[in-house]
Image (cartoon, grey):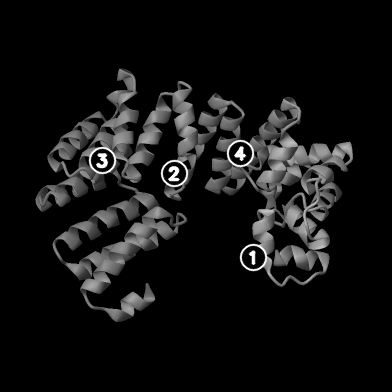
Amino acid sequence: AEHVAARVGLIVRDPGAIARASGGIPLRIRHQLLHGAELADDPIHSTIAALAPDSRDALIRLAAVAGCSQSADVASALVPDGGVRAELAHRFLIDASPERVIVHGAVRDRVLEQAQPSLIAGSRRTAARALQDLFVTRRQPLLAVEATCLRVVNGELADAFVGLRAAWREISAAGLDHLVLPALERLAAGGEAEANVLAARVYVRMARVDDAERALAALPPALADRARVLALRAAISERIGDLRGARRWIEQAVAKADDARGRGLLRLRRALVCALAGDFADAEAALAAAALDLPQPGPRDQARMAWLRAILSALRQDWPAAAAAARAGRLAVARDGGGDLDYLLMLLEIIAAAERADPDALRRL
């Protein structure tokens, strides 16, 4: 309310009351500030009705994508005329900044009620294409998440899954895979069987074991026996404390691996299961075998191996070695943008510092 008041040159004594009465919608806040008591005519309806046809179409385009993306780049692609965007902002129909263009829910719902379906669908298609192109250039995973959302909402499931698969590594590494879970569920319901595999990965990370089991149970036999699915079954067993079952599943997955790198990553997972079971010799052997399969590891694979070494050292209560391995892993993964792996390594480094009673290290972290 204070922000809107500043824009119209007024001072607000009770911004909370105004925000509550208006539902937090800037256009209604402006109406409250300028007119006091509510008028019979909803200011959203009358303001939209007063727009010229081109401006109304521009608002429809922005509203069509607002549920998935607030990117200013997308807004520019949909409404290239900066003057029209400025008019909509001046009328409090959108909030615009250099990074974001926001269409509030009440405005969005009202403007889309009677909009032509073809204009809505075309706007979402244009926005999804723009976001996918931006992702290819910038490699920012949130752009691919938003493109996937738009394509799924638009019913373009095949294109949505192709784009999602292309960006999955970045989305997962950034810890954003939970944001595409509704899209994965919609894709799976629409017949995209491999979407169940990705959804199961997300469920496992969220400790939603029953949902992960349900997703894997829906797989056709041709998919159910693949190495990555067997690895997911190992992760489920690990989650429920069945380390013997986890070891059995991960050994089957290693045997089914299609290439050396995939086998090496699965052996890292086997090393973790063995370490958690207290079988440190087998864990070391699995780690050594993984290193042979990954002779020239990239930053993230280096970090994964360092994380396993830190886990092994921590389980042996060798805290200096655990701290050193975690620190080495963080330095490696920093070259690849950090993400959730950096967070896990930082937690290990913090635990090692606490166990060593090293206040300087804790302050640094």
Q: Badge 1 local density, few (<14 within 10 Å), some, or many (20+)?
A: few
Residue in the image at 69% along x and 37% along y: 64
For the residues labelled 1 and 2, say whether their Cβ atoms are less than 8 Å apart: no
Labels 1, 3: front one: 1
Please report whichever mark, 1 or 3, sits nearer to the chain's N-terminal start: 1
Labels 1, 2: front one: 1
Residue 6 seen in the figure: yes
Describe the element under mark 4 as helix, strand or loop: helix
Residue under label 1: 16
Residue 229: image x %, image y %? Answer: 30, 31
Residue 185: image x %, image y %? Answer: 45, 31
Q: Residue 112 falls in which quadrant of the image?
A: top right
For the residues labelled 1 and 3, say whether their Cβ atoms are less than 8 Å apart: no
Describe the element under mark 1 as helix, strand or loop: helix
Labels 2, 3: front one: 2
Q: Is residue 13 above or below residue 281?
A: below
For the residues labelled 4 and 2, say whether their Cβ atoms are less than 8 Å apart: no
**Residue 235 disc label:** 3
Labels 1, 4: front one: 1
Please report whichever mark, 1 or 4, sits nearer to the chain's N-terminal start: 1
Kind of residue at badge 2? His
Instruction: Kindly report the distance in space between the C-alpha atoms of the residues bearing marks 4 and 2.
Output: 19 Å
Describe the element under mark 2 as helix, strand or loop: helix
Q: Is residue 269 left or right of residue 174?
A: left
Residue under label 2: 178
**Residue 132 disc label:** 4
Please report whichever mark, 4 or 2, sits nearer to the chain's N-terminal start: 4
Instruction: Kindly report the distance in space between the C-alpha atoms of the residues bearing marks 2 and 3.
Output: 17 Å
**For the N terminus, which image quadrant?**
bottom right
Please report whichever mark, 2 or 3, sits nearer to the chain's N-terminal start: 2
